[in-house]
Amino acid sequence: MPRYELTTDDELTRSQKDQLAHEITDVHVAVTGAPRSIVHVIFWTTGSGNAYVGGQQRPGTYLQGSVRAGRDADTISTLLHDLAAAVERATGAAADEVTVALRETPTHLVLEGGRTVGEPGAENPAFTGRASGP
């Protein structure tokens, strides 16, 4: 957790995927302070002609992220804009062809590797590399 899924009409190159995985992770860590070890990035390719908006076929690039609930509106806004810019850079997509959507998930609904992750800013030490308290 968080989990980002990028959907494109056409398959991205390995280089684009590598760049995006790093940039999405970097953005999430820089904006939220979350540990890198919990950021997941997954790529999906639909094939041409499988995306529609308003009932009309429209090619595009879609990034959906599931993030921990509890962050303020400014943090979420920064995250949205910085993620969109990263997608545009790595894919070459125009800004009006990129959609970024975030879903907030309460932390009590997330289990990763058999452990709870913790609230933003109070992560489980197993994910941060910090030792547990007394």
Image (cartoon, helix red, strand yellow):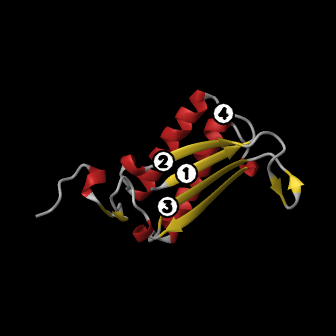
Q: Earlier in the sequence, mark 1 or mark 2?
A: 1
Question: For the residue marked with disc 2, what is the amino acid?
Answer: His
**Which residue corresponds to the image point at 45% horizontal and 45% vertical from the top-left?**
26
Q: Residues within 10 Å of mark 2 (few under 14, many from 20)?
A: some
Instruction: Identify the mark nearer the N-term, 4 or 2.
Output: 4
Q: How many marks?
A: 4
The residues tagged by marks 1 and 4 sit, at their Cα atoms, a distance apart of 16 Å
Residue at the spot of label 2: 40
Name the disc covering residue 12, or none.
4
Amino acid carrying label 4: it is Leu
Q: How many residues crowd mark 3 within 10 Å: few (<14), some (14–19), many (20+)?
A: many
**Type of the residue with mark 1:** Tyr
Determine the secondary structure under disc 3. strand
101 in relation to 16, above or below: below
Compare marks 1 and 4 and give the one earlier in the sequence: 1
The residue tagged with tag 2: helix, strand or loop?
strand
